[in-house]
Image (spheres, helix red, strand yellow):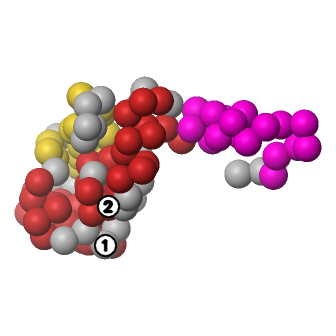
Amino acid sequence: MALAKPEETSREVFEQWRKNNYSHIPLDKFVYVTAVGNDKENYTGFYVNKNTPYEDNIFKVTAQLVSNGIPPIYIFTVNSKITDQNRLKQEVDVWLQSLDLTREQIDELDIRYQ
């Protein structure tokens, strides 16, 4: 984020940052979610969402917010670029592990393959 101009208040800077990064979460819920702590450990779907869309030569993954409650709930859609579905799932798993997710966290995600 760019440095604030002297005439900007910290509230204005915060609002712009929130708008750019987390506009899909109402302010009251945003404050709660960010105050709780580590997204990756407490809100895995929210954490993975921040790393989408993601695309490589094997798949593309996008996220869709389906509930903006606490925690927010996402569906992750994987569009395959290959025909081997076993390899596709392995590659998605490798990507999720590269985000430093545990097996339990990965298994909790709602991932849909197309």
Q: Tell me where residue 80 appears, x and y as whole percent.
A: 23, 49
Amino acid on which the number 1 mark rests in the picture:
Asp
Which-is-in-front pick, marks 1 and 2? 2
Residue 110 position by quadrant: top left
Q: Which residues are magenta?
A: 3-20
In the rendered view of the protein, which quadrant contains the C terminus?
top left
Q: Residue at x 30, y 29 (%)?
A: 68
| Relative side of 12 to 42, left or right | right
Q: Tell me where residue 71 appears, x and y as whole percent.
A: 25, 41
Q: CA distance from mark 1 to mark 2?
A: 8 Å
Dominant secondary structure of the residues highlighted in magenta in the image: helix
Q: How many marks?
A: 2
In the picture of the structure, the residue carrying the numbered disc 1 is 100
Q: Are marks 1 and 2 in contact (CB under 8 Å)?
A: yes
SS under mark 1: loop
In the picture of the structure, the residue carrying the numbered disc 2 is 40
Q: Residue at x 32, y 61 (%)?
A: 40
Query: Image height check: is 38 above or below 13?
Result: below
| Relative side of 24 to 104, left or right | right
Camera-nearest residue between 35 and 104: 35
